[in-house]
């Protein structure tokens, strides 16, 4: 293992090709390997991984490696959208890699192959393992860090498009958004449409906590009318004890759920990697109902009235007025 580690660090092409060849054989014949790690070492490795973040372009490569040999077309479609977004919006140093991945995914989705094939791309070129940056949460509160280190921090930003780019901008994950407005103004519809956009375009898993409407006919009709039905969207009528496993939680509404600003801060602290959309009712004067701290703790506040929406406070840049539908 020490010799192999040394070879990898020295970027030995023969070693990398040998590893790649062995991995491809495992995929081809559906073989498995058993790796045993000492508990103390496993804990250390998990801590290292929790402090690291891969750039979006490298995340796509990593995700592609995972699905090689798979026959899951849903995952393939989600990954293809990510690849196409990178090819459209990014200046890629190794563009040919992504074009090859795009071709492999399209061939599989179009029925040309029975599973996602493994293209001949070297691990060194594909992974770029040495170029990993620190997550923002790796820094300790109250402990100064050199600005030269901080500017190398890798933030996870979603490239929004269309009306979501106009309304919200390009949000950093995890994001916290408040939506409020008069009854019937469209805030619940907007929240559901955002859930569908994130599920269908960015592969996120979303939980809608629909306390106000519950498991009601109106929710079913709304989802059908808005065409917001997706396997990655789940719905529940009250906040579950365990919400892990979801990328986004929509709370509709915090007033019906009787969640205070303190409760929300506790949720944020328990689930630091999870995004939240907080839907609020309004007072007779048109202000959101609830403590002012609810507004202070979010990145973006969106007012929704008469089926139009606009951000009143926004750290992500979006400021345009958009129609809900």
Image (cartoon, grey):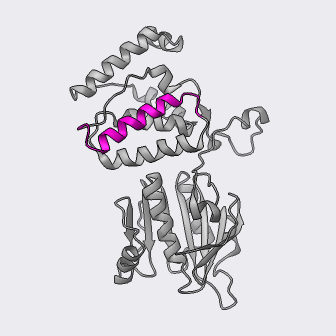
> Is residue 218 magenta-colored?
no
Q: How many marks?
A: 0
Occupied quadrant, residue 319? bottom right
Extreme residue in the left direction: 29
| Residue 171, position as x, y percentages in the image | 62, 55
Q: Nearer the viewer, residue 32 or 23?
A: 23
Residue 190 screen position, x and y as percent: 52, 72
Q: Is residue 103 left or right of residue 309?
A: left
Q: Residue visible at 53% across and 40% down?
A: 87
Q: Nearer the viewer, residue 156 or 201?
A: 201
| Residue 253 in sight | no
Picture quadrant of residue 177: bottom right
Q: Which residues are magenta?
A: 92-114
Find out whether residue 110 is within the magenta segment.
yes
Residue 292 image position (x, y, % from top left) = 70, 74
Q: Residue at x 41, y 68 (%)?
A: 228
116 vs 3, left or right, is left
Question: Which residue is at a point 47% across and 70% down the rendered structure image?
Answer: 192
Kindly indicate the quadrant of the structure image that contains residue 36.
top left
Q: Considering only vertical position in the picture, is 59 above or below 317?
A: above
């Amino acid at each position: 293992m020490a010799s192999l580690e040394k070879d990898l660090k020295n970027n030995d092409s023969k070693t990398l090709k040998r590893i790649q060849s062995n991995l491809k054989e495992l995929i081809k014949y559906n073989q498995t390997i058993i790796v045993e790690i000492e508990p103390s070492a496993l804990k250390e490795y998990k801590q290292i991984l929790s402090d690291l973040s891969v750039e979006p372009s490298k995340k796509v490569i990593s995700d592609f490696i995972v699905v090689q040999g798979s026959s899951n077309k849903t995952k393939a479609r989600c990954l293809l959208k990510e690849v196409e977004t990178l090819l459209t919006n990014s200046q890629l140093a190794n563009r040919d890699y992504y074009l090859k991945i795009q071709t492999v995914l399209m061939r599989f989705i179009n029925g040309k192959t029975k599973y996602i094939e493994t293209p001949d791309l070297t691990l060194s070129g594909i992974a770029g393992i040495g170029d990993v940056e620190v997550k923002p949460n790796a820094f300790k509160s109250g402990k100064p860090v050199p600005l030269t280190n901080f500017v190398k921090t890798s933030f996870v930003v979603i490239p929004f498009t269309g009306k979501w780019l106009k309304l919200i901008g390009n949000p950093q994950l995890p994001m916290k958004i408040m939506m409020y407005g008069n009854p019937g103004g469209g805030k619940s519809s907007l929240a559901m449409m955002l859930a569908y956009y994130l599920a269908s375009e960015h592969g996120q898993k979303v939980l809608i906590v629909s306390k106000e409407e519950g498991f009601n006919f109106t929710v079913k009709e709304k989802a059908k009318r808005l065409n917001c039905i997706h396997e990655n969207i789940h719905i529940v009528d009250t906040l579950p004890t365990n919400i892990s496993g979801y990328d986004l939680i929509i709370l509709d509404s915090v007033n019906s759920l009787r969640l205070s600003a303190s409760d929300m801060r506790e949720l944020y602290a328990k689930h630091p990697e999870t995004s939240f959309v907080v839907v609020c009712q309004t007072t007779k004067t048109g202000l959101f109902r609830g403590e002012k701290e609810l507004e202070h703790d979010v990145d973006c506040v969106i007012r929704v009235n008469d089926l139009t929406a606009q951000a009143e406070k926004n750290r992500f840049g979006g400021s345009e007025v958009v129609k809900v539908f």
